[in-house]
Amino acid sequence: MSNLKIFGLMMIVICMLCACNTTTGGPSTSLDGSSIIRKDSLKEKQQVSDYFTTLFTDIFETEKKESNGDLLIPETKILDVNVKPEFKEFNSKNAVVNLKLSIDSNPRVKATLGKLKSYEAEIDAMRAVKALTSKIQAVGGLESENRSTKSAAGVILSTQKLLYDARSADLRIESKTYQRKSGEISVLVSADLVALDALKAWIDLVRFKRVNKLFSDGFERTQPLLDQIKSVSTSGLTDKKSLLVSQRQIMELQDRFLAAQSMRKVSEEIFLDSFPGANLSTVVDAPRIKIDANDVFGSYDLENVPSIREKLLLMDALKLNMAGLEASNSPQVAFRASVNAPMDNTLDDGVANAGFNLTYDFNDGGSRAAQVAQVKAELDILRSEIGDLKNKLKVEYSKNAINYETSLDRIDALSNLIEISKEIKETARQQLLSGRSTIKDVLDAEVTLSSLKIDQANAEADILITLITAKAYKDGLTQMIGWSY
């Protein structure tokens, strides 16, 4: 604090007090003169008030900036999106490591963690209501009495402790504690969804990479055969209809190939959203996470689903909050003590008091009843949300169970068809030399085999995504991969 400012303030006060002491006459009795004096007096008071306002603003704002202003108003830190985690190669062995990095760097998870910290701060603030509180107030300046001015100072020390409030404060603290517990599960639920999105993106990218590779390999094998069919057809040794059918088969594959290329580009963008800064060339294999299908699709207790538990804890928090509001209708008893000690004649003029303070609001204008009604409405909303969430989880569970069984049957069927298709292709090639098969027979076999392998790649990706999704909604993924905050 500037010594010059303090000195200036003291001089102004002294001059004002001296002016009061030396004033012997009153305002002018002239009608015109009294009006002018009042206007000048009001103007001077406004100028003095403005000066004090500016002075104290400069003093305390400067002090806040020079001392601990950063503690009172912490600087808001914005997440630097340019800071990217260092992911390892995306193969089956590094699945857990890369998933943890994805969760840790996700803004959604960081936001829920921030809410959790705010709950903890609110609990500490609520506990302070029941704690012993003390404050000290120092007063200093000049005292004018009987046209005599002298310096004066005093200290006021007070303390307070809440003794009884019908457990209103305890119930509210307990309510906020349940809200914090709900927030803890909310962090895990948020991390589960982030992990689920990341796994889906990873699996899809590997899927479309594999599908595009199958298409490319298939075209390399079928294009020479198609060229041979065209050359034979132009010589008039084969039917034009056969060429048309073959070209149509290739065009259908090309259309599917173009769609697969588009899906790969989309999957790359989605993948980079879950794994920011990752090198796409390092994605070489799908993640392998051990999940017991019998456990996932076995017994299903909705009350133990993390997203349901989160809302049930919120419901408990609201009930406790309502109980706390109702308890606040009771009287409150607090112990209070204070000491007022002037600088001069401290023992003679000092004042001390201690005792109990009873407070009871017998009429608050309906404020408490309105708050209770609001909490009841929030409870009704939460019950509806829980019921809706349970219905959605049941549908999702049934859908995943059906898709899983269907995908299993499809994979088994495709495996058998692929083996048969391989045999047909080899037989067609062998019989081509003896004339028992045509080039079109070999082309048909190649096209069929490529299509079946592509269907198999999609089915394997679908069944993995289905299993992971069912696991995420039932038990969560964070515990399985060992992630914690």
Image: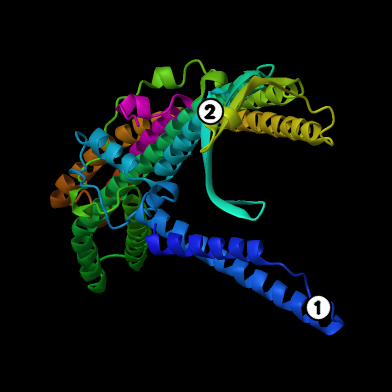
> Is 480 one of the magenta-colored residues?
yes
Residue at coordinates 81% horizontally, 78% vertically from top-left?
Answer: 34
Name the side, left or right, on which 321 lies relative to 426.
right
Q: Nearer the viewer, residue 324 or 308?
A: 324
Say which quarter of the image contains residue 250.
bottom left
Tell me the quadrant of the picture where the C terminus can be found: top left
Q: Earlier in the sequence, mark 2 or mark 1?
A: 1
The numbered disc on residue 378 is: none
Give the answer, above or below, for where 77 lies relative to 247. above
Above or below: residue 477 compared with residue 233: above
Residue linked to disc 2: 133
> What's the residue type where badge 2 is placed?
Thr
Q: Amino acid at mark 1?
A: Ser
From which residue to which does the magenta span run?
458-485
Task: Say left or right for 89 vs 141.
Answer: left
Residue located 85% across and 31% down the image: 363
- The residue indicated by pointer 1 is 34
- Relative to 258, 137 lies left or right: right
Label 1, residues with CA under 10 Å away: few <14, some 14-19, many ≥20: some
Q: Residue furthest bottom?
A: 32
- Which secondary structure, mark 2? strand
